[in-house]
């Protein structure tokens, strides 16, 4: 039992801090009867410290310990260097102060002493949030905070980062970084945060998104330099997108407008708009430059009174003293002229020109984008000489029967006539080069006849040889000589709609028709039985990209020939088809695009209809390219990379079968039989005779024609 005096002392100890508890030695917890004992512990149990008695280290790094000392004497009990290992925040965010107490007890007694140290916060927590408003997943953006001059790792949009800082004010600078940083109205900001020890403080670093301008130029076939507020943002483009500060008046311009299809016929004026975009919003801007016509059309119809089919005469048109071209009798041609008034002179040209009166002169106003019409009518002069005597009609000699389909092939060496006959070929095609002043010879003609073939000669020359209309008559003389030697067919020039084969800047169906007319008359005068085929244009749709001074689309060129009266000076319409990668029986499904030259049927319909179905088509080149047996194709011909030899053989047979059963195709010349060059222009890839001498196409064609 405790005395009243001892209970009073115990009560005072309980109220003191730290808590002191005295008790007699319990069973199992003996204390030396001559010694005073102190059982000392730290709370919570996660704490450890170094225990001292009267300045002497007794138990280092412990949570609790029994300490001893002299009885009935004051002892200083201390716990120094308090640690809380494994607990987040200790030492960084908070610490514990040293603990001490002065205590005495009697001999054999045990004092239980508990220390409850309180955390002393030396830092506070700062939570930072990156908030670029209007952020999209496709944006490349982040916040880069700098705290009191120390740059921290980047914080992703809408993400948080927590920092431990000493109490007091701290300067927080934030930079927006990343490729998309310019899309926000400001790229940096300054903030001050006040940190309190043991407390949390929050900062959201918010950035306003600029407004967006989405700019489009209409129509979308034109391009322009797009400016915003005087700065070029897109050169020769149809569209642009730009972020601008919110609630700002912006000036949007389209300058230097270009149109690949204009070809000098029109232009577009610059145009300007103003607009405001709001924060995070999108403003759609449509720039519509005004089209200004620079040219118009003169549609001229030529009529020669009492014209005979044997007459060599046409209307020759000049504007302001500059020749425009020739227009055949009873035909119409369309000429492009600058807007305004023009002095038009029309005269009759050709060997029979003296039979008609003239010339005619007038002033014609040309209106931008419009067509002005004029009929040039020439009356036969009194006592006009009679027209020339008509030559015998085509047909006969060489076995050319108008309307009957025949097959042939283009050759280089002409070493396998046996395979060509097996395939059912009647014709052999060879190219002949003409130069001004050349004299024709009969070597290739005689060779073909000796081997039992009709011969088609494709006669072409250098573009420079006919520049400015020069040497047309010399070319006509040359092909007339070939006809006299017995040529069964002559193709007048080749691919005259591109500047590789015709003078640049002079590509014109009316000019070509003039050459065709002169050649036809010479050929028929020399040999009425020679089949005259118009030059086959290159199948293309590139005039919009390169301009008509370099290339005409073949359908436009053929239509222009028809308008110029070319139908009167040919027996057959020349055509090329050599870009197919699908069966000729199909009229859709080409993986490249739906352009009509991709399809055999598209070529047939377009060319046959161009001349009102009055002339049949002669394919002077028709072939399918395959790299099989040779290796990869050059990049310009990569479209045929997947075509096989078996497909080549099948598709040639299908094309011939279609032609034989049609009323629109007179001839197919397969391109080619035996060419061996395989490089940038992989002609050997078109060849029927493959590496090693096999000819699968010979077999497939034989199955259609039965051979001969």
Image (cartoon, rainbow, N blue to C red):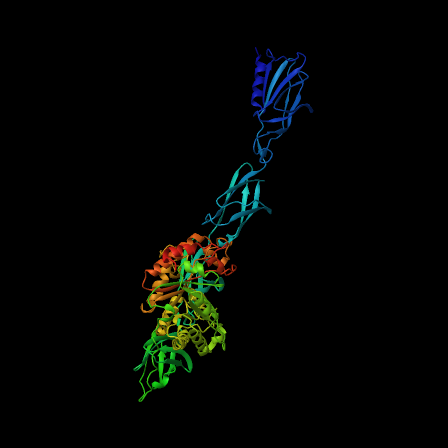
Pick out the residue farthest to the bottom: 383
Residue 332 locus on image (x, y percent): 34, 75
Using the rendered view, name the quadrant where residue 47 is placed.
Answer: top right
Give above or below for 427 relative to 3: below
- Residue 88 or 579: which is nearer the viewer? 579
Residue 394 locus on image (x, y percent): 35, 72
Using the rendered view, name the quadrant where residue 169 is placed.
Answer: top right
Residue 15 locus on image (x, y percent): 56, 22
Residue 416 locus on image (x, y percent): 47, 60
Pick out the residue farthest to the front: 450
Pick out the residue farthest to the right: 56
Is there any visible trace of residue 218 in the rendered image?
Answer: no
Q: Is residue 198 left or right of residue 249?
A: right
- Residue 110 or 418: which is nearer the viewer? 418
- Residue 49 or 35: which is nearer the viewer? 49
Q: Is residue 308 left or right of residue 460?
A: left
Q: Is residue 107 left or right of residue 587?
A: right
Image quarter where the C terminus lies is bottom left
Image quarter where the N terminus lies is top right
Give above or below for 323 relative to 102: below
- Residue 69 or 320: which is nearer the viewer? 320
Is there any visible trace of residue 384 in the rendered image?
Answer: yes
Using the rendered view, name the quadrant where residue 215 is placed.
Answer: bottom left
Number of numbered discs on residues = 0
Q: Residue at x 52, y 38 (%)?
A: 200
């Amino acid at each position: 039992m405790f005395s009243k005096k001892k209970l009073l002392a115990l009560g005072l100890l309980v109220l003191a801090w730290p808590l002191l508890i005295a008790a007699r030695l319990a069973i199992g917890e003996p204390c030396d009867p001559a010694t005073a004992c102190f059982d000392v512990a730290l709370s919570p149990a996660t704490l450890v410290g170094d225990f001292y008695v009267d300045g002497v280290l007794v138990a280092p790094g412990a949570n609790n310990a029994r300490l001893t000392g002299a009885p009935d004497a004051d002892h200083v009990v201390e716990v120094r260097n308090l640690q809380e290992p494994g607990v987040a925040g200790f030492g960084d965010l908070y610490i514990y102060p040293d603990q001490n107490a002065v205590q005495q007890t009697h001999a054999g007694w045990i004092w239980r002493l508990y220390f409850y140290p309180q955390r002393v916060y030396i830092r506070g927590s700062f939570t930072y949030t990156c908030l670029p408003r209007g952020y999209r997943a496709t944006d490349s953006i982040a916040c880069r905070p700098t705290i009191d001059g120390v740059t921290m790792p980047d914080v992703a949009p809408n993400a948080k980062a927590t920092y431990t800082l000493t109490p007091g004010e701290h300067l927080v600078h934030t930079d927006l970084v990343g490729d998309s940083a310019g899309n926000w109205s400001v790229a940096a900001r300054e903030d001050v945060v006040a940190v309190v020890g043991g407390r949390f403080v929050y900062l959201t670093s918010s950035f306003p998104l600029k407004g967006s301008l989405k700019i489009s130029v209409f129509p979308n076939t034109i391009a322009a330099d797009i400016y915003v507020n005087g700065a070029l943002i897109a050169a020769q483009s149809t569209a642009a997108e730009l972020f601008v500060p919110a609630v700002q008046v912006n000036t949007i311009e389209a300058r230097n407008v270009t149109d690949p299809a204009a070809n000098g016929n029109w232009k577009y004026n610059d145009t300007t708009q103003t607009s405001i975009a709001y924060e995070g919003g999108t403003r759609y801007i449509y720039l519509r430059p005004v089209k200004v016509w620079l040219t118009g059309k003169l549609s001229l119809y030529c009529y020669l009174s009492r014209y005979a089919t044997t007459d060599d005469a046409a209307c020759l048109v000049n504007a302001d003293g500059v020749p425009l071209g020739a227009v055949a009798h009873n035909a119409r041609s369309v000429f492009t002229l600058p807007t305004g008034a023009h002095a038009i002179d029309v005269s009759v040209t050709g060997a029979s020109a003296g039979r008609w009166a003239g010339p005619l002169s007038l002033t014609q106003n040309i209106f931008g984008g419009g067509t002005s019409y004029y009929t040039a009518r020439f009356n036969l002069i009194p006592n006009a000489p009679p027209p020339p005597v008509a030559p015998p009609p085509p047909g006969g000699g060489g076995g050319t029967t108008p309307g009957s389909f025949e097959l042939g092939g283009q050759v280089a060496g002409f070493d396998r006539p046996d395979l060509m006959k097996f395939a059912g070929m009647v014709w052999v095609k060879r190219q002949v080069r003409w130069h001004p002043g050349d004299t024709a010879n009969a070597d290739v003609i005689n060779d073909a006849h000796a081997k039992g073939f009709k011969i088609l000669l494709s006669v072409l020359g250098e573009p420079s040889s006919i520049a400015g209309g020069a040497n047309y008559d010399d070319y006509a003389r040359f092909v007339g000589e070939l006809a006299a030697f017995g040529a069964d067919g002559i193709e007048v020039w080749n691919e005259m709609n591109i500047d590789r084969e015709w003078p640049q800047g002079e590509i014109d169906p009316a000019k070509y028709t003039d050459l065709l007319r002169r050649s036809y008359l010479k050929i028929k005068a020399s040999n009425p039985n020679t089949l005259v085929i118009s030059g086959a244009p290159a199948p293309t749709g590139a005039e919009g990209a390169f301009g008509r001074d370099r290339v005409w689309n073949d359908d436009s060129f053929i239509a222009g020939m028809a308008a110029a009266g070319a139908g009167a000076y040919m027996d057959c319409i020349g055509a090329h088809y050599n870009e197919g990668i699908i069966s000729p029986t199909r009229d859709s499904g080409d993986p490249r695009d739906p352009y009509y030259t991709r399809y055999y049927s598209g070529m047939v319909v377009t060319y046959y209809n161009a001349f009102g179905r009055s002339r049949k088509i002669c394919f002077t080149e028709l072939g399918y390219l395959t790299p099989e047996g040779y290796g990869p194709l050059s990049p310009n011909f990569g479209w045929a990379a997947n075509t096989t030899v078996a497909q080549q053989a099948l598709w040639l047979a299908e094309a011939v079968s279609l032609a034989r059963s049609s009323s629109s195709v007179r001839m197919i010349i397969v391109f080619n039989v035996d060419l061996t060059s395989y490089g940038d222009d992989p002609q050997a890839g078109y060849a029927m005779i493959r590496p090693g001498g096999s000819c699968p196409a010979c077999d497939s064609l034989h199955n259609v024609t039965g051979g001969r």
